[in-house]
Amino acid sequence: MKWFNSVIIIFMPLVPKPIVRIFSKKYVAGDKLDDAVRAVRELNGQHIMATLDVLGESTTDEQETHLYVEEYLRVLQIIEQEKLDCNVSLKPTQLGMLIDKELAFSNIRRIVEEAKKHANFVRIDMEDSNCTTDTIDIYERLRAEFDNVGIVLQAYMRRSVADLTKISRRPANFRLCKGIYIEPREIAYKEPSIVNMNFGFLLEKALQAGSYVGIATHDEKVVWSALRTIDQLGLKPDAYEFQMLFGVDEQLRRILVQAGHRLRVYVPYGKQWYRYVMRRLKENPQIAIYVLKALFKK
Ligand SMILES: Cc1cc2nc3c(=O)[nH]c(=O)nc-3n(C[C@H](O)[C@H](O)[C@H](O)COP(=O)(O)OP(=O)(O)OC[C@H]3O[C@@H](n4cnc5c(N)ncnc54)[C@H](O)[C@@H]3O)c2cc1C
């Protein structure tokens, strides 16, 4: 079946956008903020926290970056108005990092400053390896000024252990994930079992350093190893949270919540869904087959 998945991945970019749009419904809350608010309310009703992501990345037009800032400010306002248990996640390239690093810094700073006024929190997502150094730099400058900002470390990156040590000099709030971009072997582990071991190693190191960690995975092997570390360190449930993506493994979500762990779901919304959904489908081509089957059943 592995070869079949590889074939699906190669041909995925040829799939017409309206078809990909069908798959998007699984991973994206909708086009509008109202759709996202509805999804978050439903999650909160199941004792699940959320993080809202305005879809968009690799922006090349400065004016567009300002529109994204305005949208995030609106999101923060609505979260407070609607009393949602929800923070926000954003991408530096969406906010101008490919145009000018200082533009991205000042855009993200505005959002973090506004979040602070609303007693809320901003997570800076980690994109491909061309962005890692600048993203960490932006985070460190913001963290020197604000305590309501966090970053992401990717377990597949060889540099992550050094980055963790550097960032942990101040109390930090990390999201730890495997990493989704395609990176060369020189800088990233390619062997899945090593990525999993590095995930466990980084998690233990971060928790031991007193960081709050968002354990972002749907891999039960990684979840099990995280639960073992949490138990060994005798941590209370407020020292960490599990994080999962909208549309992925709702059963595992329920298992973790029922066991008393905090859980947050990443809820993306907006018109720029194409790249996000293509990454998700490449991660799990099996889903494409399920969706097609479901279509034909109808
Ligand atoms: C909350 C959150 C935030 C993230 N933020 C970032 C980020 O900032 N930067 C970054 O590089 N990556 C990010 N990721 C993606 C992450 O790096 C992984 O690519 C992704 O989570 C898949 O890895 P996994 O740990 O779930 O393990 P995998 O081994 O990939 O998956 C384990 C199992 O989960 C299920 N699964 C996984 N993905 C899917 C899917 N798309 N559809 C259906 N089932 C699926 C499958 O059953 C699979 O067997 C984030 C992930 C999460 C959960």
Image: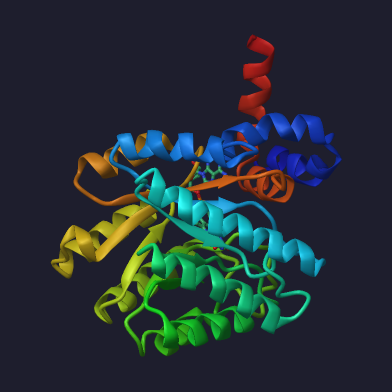
Residue 13, image x and y in percent?
82, 44
- Is 279 in front, or is 108? 108
Residue 244 visible, this angle:
no
The answer to whether 3 appears left or right of 15 in the picture is left
Residue 48 visible, this angle:
yes
Residue farthest to the left, as pictured? 234
Above or below, 109 against 72 in this view is below
Image quarter in which the N terminus is found: top right
Residue farthest to the top, as pictured? 298
- Tell how many labels: 0
Residue 39, image x and y in percent?
47, 36
The answer to whether 255 appears left or right of 284 in the picture is left
The answer to whether 63 appears left or right of 101 in the picture is right
Residue 154, image x and y in percent?
52, 69
Instruction: Name the image quarter holding residue 87.
Output: bottom left
- Is 166 in front, or is 195? 166
Q: At 62% from the left edge and 32% from the top edge, which residue is drawn?
A: 25
Above or below, 199 against 146 in this view is above
Image quarter in which the C terminus is found: top right
Q: At 52% from the left edge and 40% from the top edge, which residue is drawn?
A: 36
Instruction: Name the image quarter holding residue 146.
Output: bottom left
Residue 85, image x and y in percent?
34, 49
The colour style of the image is rainbow
The answer to whether 150 appears left or right of 22 in the picture is left
